[in-house]
Amino acid sequence: MQKNMNTKINKYDLILIIILLLLTFLSLIFIYKKDKKYKYAYVYYENKLVKKIDLNKDKNYTVKGYNGMVKLVVKNKKIKVSEEKSPKHLCSKRGYISHSYEQIICLPNKIVVEIKTVDNIDTVVK
């Protein structure tokens, strides 16, 4: 025995579909706007800021570390240590980082690289 299903869409189904489409559209806008933030890499040597790097520009940088020069590479809004002098080269094996919760910590060279995201804000009201 097979039941005949009524495939009419009632007004509550239509409202639910519209709400889901709106939520999807708004989430896509949020993701698009999120990518427009400015990202900077902050490089610290012995807990002192030595360089602020704009991740929107692909470029190579060099900073002085405890064991010698540390080379940094910025590519596609990501940063990595490409070359450094340390016993096991763990800093350069770390690879690229691109999020604010990631860090490159190079203990032999006393270098820390961290990413901070800055919104394009005109004013702040307290």
Image (cartoon, helix red, strand yellow):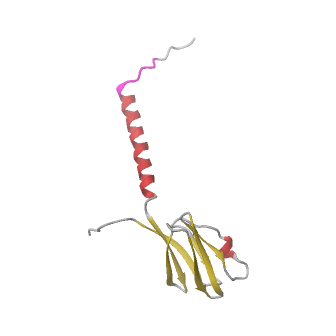
Residue lying at the far left in this picture: please name it. Answer: 125
Q: Main secondary structure of the magenta part?
A: loop
Residue at horizontal 55%, vertical 76%?
113
Q: Position of residue 2 (x, y in %)?
A: 56, 13
Q: Quadrant of the N terminus?
A: top right
Residue 5's x, y, as percent? 49, 17
Which residue is painted at 29% across and 68% down in the image? 124
As drawn, the residue found furthest toward the right would be 88
The front one of 72 and 91 is: 72
Q: Which quarter of the picture shows residue 96? A: bottom right
Residue 95 position, x and y percent, is: 64, 68
Identify which residue, 35 or 8, lies in the foreground.
35
In this view of the protein, can residue 106 be seen by the observer? Answer: no
Q: In the rendered image, which quarter is residue 59 located in?
A: bottom right
Label count reads 0
- Residue at screen point 56% across, 63% down: 76
Extreme residue toward the top, this view: 1
Residue 23 at x, y percent in the picture:
40, 43
The magenta stretch is 6-11
Q: Nearer the viewer, residue 82 or 7?
A: 82
Question: With respect to residue 77, does 10 lie above or below?
Answer: above
User: In the displayed structure, would residue 32 be above or below residue 87?
Assistant: above
Q: Is residue 79 left or right of residue 16?
A: right
Residue 42 can be seen in this image? yes
